[in-house]
Amino acid sequence: MESIKDKVAIIGMGCTQFGELWDKDAYDLVIDCAYEAYDDAGIDPKAIQAAWVGTAMGTTGTQLSAPLKTDYIPVTRLENMCATGMESLRAATYAVIAKAYDLVLAIGYEKLKDTGFGGLGLATQAGGSEKWHPVFGSGDSAPGRYALAATRYFHQFGLSREEGKRTLAKISVKSHYNGARNPRAHLRMEVTEEQVIKAPIIAWPLGLFDACGVTDGGSAAILCRTEDVKKYKPGGEYITIKSFGISTGPGTGKIRTDYDYTHWEETQRAARQAYADAGIKDPRQDIDMCEVHDCFSIAELMCYEDLGFCEKGKAKHDIEAGAFALDGKHPFNVGGGLKSFGHPVGASGIREVFEGYVEILGRAQLPERQLKNVEMALAHNQGGNPGRFIASVCIVGVPGK
């Protein structure tokens, strides 16, 4: 299988403010992120030859073509649960590699606040297309699943209830610290460990500050083949896509008697695919920052291990040493993560790539959140329901790295 490394360039990106955007509708989000990307790329919107829009809630490609008036070009709507945004970017990438198109647009957006749900509620909002699972029925929940992972992790690796809860609290504190310094983030406030520990419980040990918020937002990317990039960015302000990895599993691990709950097989496999295609031998040495799917604090902890940044069961020690902090050896969720930045399902994947884009190009807006010498960035999403589980990894970086 041929590598895609450095064959496609991202020449422009846009990202809306994330939050409770009551004064904007879905079309506004698409317009705002797209036109920021157009301006960044320095192109006329009419130059776009094809577009992909990722949304869990929308219905057709008209969710992009109507507000952007992309008359008579192909527009495709995608959905792949929480990997939706990254799937939009992946589809656009491979279309460019195939030389079906020269200049394309990928967008992800979601208007979750308007639904009135406290969580995602995707099955109901999609018109009831998701059926009851024959084993789990309809009573399974995302907080419940991740709480099972957290309690099993505590047991398997010898953390007391207090140690485990405080370890997770440190992750949330770190994410809020980063998000408080990100002008586009939804929840821009720092929190203390005690606030996290004493917050109302959702599903023990996960409390209010262990969970991401329900958020509106949009993100966009404009892509071309790297061989053509000088037409658009003669000054060299662009990044290249190194690889994608995606894995879909049956999502039924937790009905097996040998399932340990402390790893995500799909994330591990997606990472291995992405590392192999990008030529990454040791992610701890080769990758400078990660934006991962921290829908709950335990999800980020498991990513440290599943993505190869610390040994199995050793995350607690690296967390306490500050390894994943903004000034640590392996900065994770520099933008605040889903936890603080927010998680509009369709927008999250491209937004995570956007964080790598601005850090690599030195555009982090505030000096205190600009990392030094970022050459390679990883973005990761995962999600699903009891019948299926999906994980996606994208690696981007400076050309030729």
Image (tube, rainbow, N blue to C red):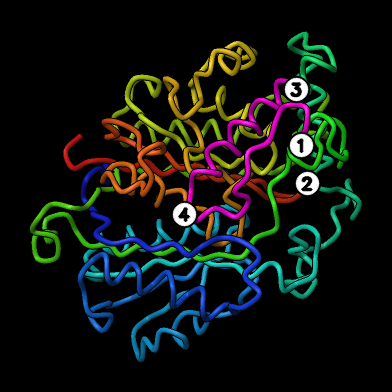
Residue 237 visible to the viewer? yes
Closer to the camera: disc 2 or disc 3? 2
Density class for disc 1 (Cα within 10 Å; few <14, some 14-19, many ≥20) is: many
What x and y, as percent, mark residue 46?
Answer: 26, 84
Task: Determine whether the residue tagged by mark 2 lies in a helix, strand or loop.
Answer: helix
Residue designated by label 1:
146
Tell me if residue 302 comes above or below residue 310 in the rendering.
below
Identified by mark 3, the residue type is Asp
Q: Residue at x 71, y 26 (%)?
A: 168
Residue designated by label 2:
142
In magenta segment, residue 233 = no
Marks 4 and 1 close (CB-CB < 8 Å): no
Task: Determine whether the residue tagged by mark 1 lies in a helix, strand or loop.
Answer: helix
Q: CA distance from mark 2 to mark 3?
A: 17 Å
Residue 2 visible to the viewer? no
Marks 1 and 2 close (CB-CB < 8 Å): yes
Q: Residue 107's mark?
A: none
Residue designated by label 3:
260
Q: Residue at x 32, y 43 (%)?
A: 396
Residue designated by label 4:
351
Mark sitting earlier along the chain (4/1): 1
The range drawn in magenta is 166-195
Mark sitting earlier along the chain (2/3): 2
Q: CA distance from mark 3 to mark 4?
A: 31 Å
Looking at the rendering, which quadrant does residue 96 occupy?
bottom left
